[in-house]
Image (tube, helix red, strand yellow):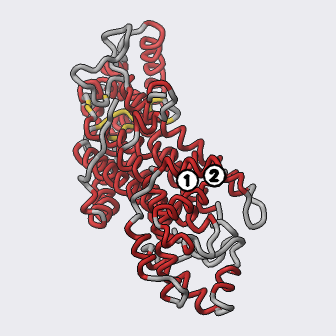
Amino acid sequence: MSDFESYQNPLITRYASQQMSRIWSSQVRHATWRRLWVALAESQQELGLEITGEQLASLRDAIEDIDFEVVAGYERDLRHDVMAHVHAYGDRCPEARGIIHLGATSCFVTDNTDLLLLRQSLELVRDRLVGVIHHLALFAAARRDLPCLGFTHLQPAQPVTIGKRATLWCYDLVLDLEELEHRLDSLRLRGVKGTTGTQATFLSLFDGDHQKVARLEELVAEKMGGGRVYPVTGQTYSRKIDAQVLGVLGGIGISAHKAGNDIRILQHRKEMEEPFGTRQVGSSAMAYKRNPMRSERMCGLSRFAISLCDSATDTAATQWMERTLDDSANRRLVLPQAFLAIDAVLILYRNIVEGLVVYPEVIARRLNEELPFMATEEILMAGVRAGGDRQELHEAIRVHSQAAGAEVKERGGENDLMSRLQGDPQFAGVDLDGALDASGFIGRAVEQVDEFIAGVIEPIRERYRGALDADAGEVTV
């Protein structure tokens, strides 16, 4: 069957980067298995087992030379993927056949490899995340003092600034970065633990020498670049680790989805717009449309990644004793797809942020439509300072506000509250025009943006200087 006659995963064909796809490829996975087998054999030789240099050299030379058709043939016969690869490796290195996988169980290669792939994937996600944080902060700084209407309950509320709103999106990602850094720091290797985690087979190989078994695990971990191993495991490392890692990815999905929803609402209001290509088609029927397709896709992929968290937690909760195999098929799907989805999400997020278009005139008009209502408290205080009676002024403002609201909602007119107040002699001594200066209603929004960038973003930029403008990935469709 050709590629067009069988299902192709759109995470690979449409959304995620080649870098992330390669990390989870069969070539990388199974070459890592071979690296682990080499590390195990080298360490066993160093500790006195009869393994020759020629055998090790043969295994090293064939690490990347994997005949997947031969492997597939063995697996059809054996119904066991690890043993299929053991036999295929042995065919390629016949002189070393007898020492491949010596004393190990399948999870020596499968679990240690998964942990190495998790680390590589988290590092790629971290760099993409830092890039989005950096560019969101640049956007926030550029729009730090542009007043806009704030919303609570999706209803008009006290004004904020475009930059201040962007810091909300950015800080969610900062929290995700902190969690990701913690998970990376705590991630270890499964090590050399044996079939139920007791290292019994390795103890037998080394004639009951506990120190050699302990040293074997240290050597293998050092050769694989991990250094640290989990102190205890069953046959597998705790599947709680997977749940924790996917929790990080789900958290990024939550942050991206929230921002994507905000951007879609703002594009509906014509205040802000995601990038739109010169030949991009918004609708097959309505040629005038400029749909927020990037933000919509970001939300859709985020929702998918979030949903995978439940699968990982269910798997961790339903493992039996030292292990059960119902995790295997599930993890083959969930782990790579969660990373591929979040990889695509962060590529989209950065693309959106770098191309965000802001429409200040629309923003000002939207704000001015609501500002008279928000200015009434200041107008009331100004009227009192000018000698008016507080209760009488309050009642006058209430009556005029209700009438202005009816004009807007019932007759579709403009908000004429200010003209009503200007015609009321009770407010003759009040500077009504000055009361509508939007900059007087944004509190410390500008200062908060500056403080956030200086206190939170700059340390991140300093830690990850090389990742700030690293490859952003490509939005392919």
Judged left or right of residue 122, residue 468 is: left
Identify the disc placed on residue 312.
2
Dot 1 alpha-carbon crowd within 10 angstroms: few under 14, some 14 to 19, many 20 or more: many
Contact flag, marks 1 and 2 (Cβ < 8 Å): yes
Q: What is the three-letter code of the residue carrying label 2? A: Ala
- Could you tell me how many numbered marks the image carries? 2
Identify the disc placed on residue 274.
none
Query: Hey, which quadrant is residue 304 in on the image?
Result: top right
| Nearer to the camera, 288 or 148 | 288
| Nearer to the camera, 431 or 322 | 322
Q: CA distance from mark 1 to mark 2?
A: 7 Å
Q: Earlier in the sequence, mark 1 or mark 2?
A: 1
| Nearer to the camera, 104 or 134 | 104
| Nearer to the camera, 238 or 467 | 238
Residue at figure coordinates x 26%, y 40% from the top left: 354
Where residue 286 sits in the image (x, y, percent)? 36, 9
Q: Is there any visible trace of residue 141 in the rendered image?
A: yes
Where residue 133 sits in the image (x, y, percent)? 34, 51
SS label for mark 2: helix
Q: What is the three-letter code of the residue carrying label 1? A: Leu
Where residue 101 sits in the image (x, y, percent)? 57, 70
Judged left or right of residue 382, residue 400 is: right
Q: Is residue 236 above or below residue 350?
A: below
Residue at figure coordinates x 44%, y 70% from the top left: 59
Q: Is there any visible trace of residue 392 in the rendered image?
A: no
Q: Which residue is mark 1?
A: 246
